[in-house]
Image: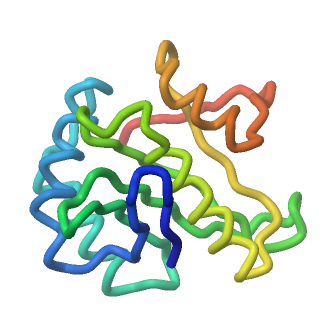
Amino acid sequence: MSTLSQTGVHIRPAETGDLETLGAWAAELLRQWDADATREDAIRVYQRILSSPEMGVIFVAEHNGVMSGFVYAAYQWRAEFAGETLDMVEMFVEQSWRNKGVGRALLDALAAHARARQIHRITCQVHPGNAAIERALESGGFDPERRTLWGVRL
């Protein structure tokens, strides 16, 4: 896929052998977000994405065979944007790898993947106060949009 030469981080598609690590990282994200979901719920989602690649994509960053982060994005079809779009759902970089370009490498890999599929729009929802992801998105060319997200829990 791609390599970030200055840190030696390699980006590749996730595999089923990565699920336990992804689940542990997702549990940390879920706690930060005060979500109702569990680590097991996250693993179930990732398993579904890996077994149904038409639904989305998961990339992992690794250095010397050890994972340092991941990004998960889901495909959507929107007439507003003339076809398929990509919604970045989650991104996580392990603490010791933060501020070393891993997040940017994951974003770059996601953008390259989107271009290869002829997707012209990537979106991401950001929890208030998450300055780290906002910096990473801004460095990747993302701009905040002025829309209001509405939802209902069922």
Which of the pair 13/123 is nearer the observer? 13
Left or right, residue 56 beside residue 119? left
Q: Could you tell me residue 36's position as x and y percent?
A: 22, 35
Position of residue 95 relative to residue 9, above or below, is: above
Q: Quadrant of residue 32?
A: top left
Q: Residue at x 30, y 62 (%)?
A: 62
Query: Which is nearer the eye, 50 or 112?
Result: 112
Q: Position of residue 13 (x, y in %)?
A: 39, 76
Residue at 32%, 86% in the rendered image: 51
Residue 27 image offset from top left, x and y in percent: 17, 41
Please say which color scheme the image uses.
rainbow
Q: Is residue 75 left or right of residue 140?
A: left
Say which residue appears at 63% left-offset and 37% top-offset: 137
Specify the quadrant of the image occupied by residue 35: top left
In the rendered view, tell whether residue 128 sits above or below residue 149. Answer: above
In the current view of this chain or complex, which residue is farthest to the top?
129
Question: In the image, 29: left or right of 58?
Answer: left
Number of numbered discs visible in the structure rendering: 0
| Residue extending furthest toward the front | 6
Residue 56: image x %, image y %? 49, 72
Residue in the picture at 42% in, 46% down: 91
Horizontal side of 26 relative to 99 (left or right) equals left
Which quarter of the rendering shows the C terminus?
Answer: top left
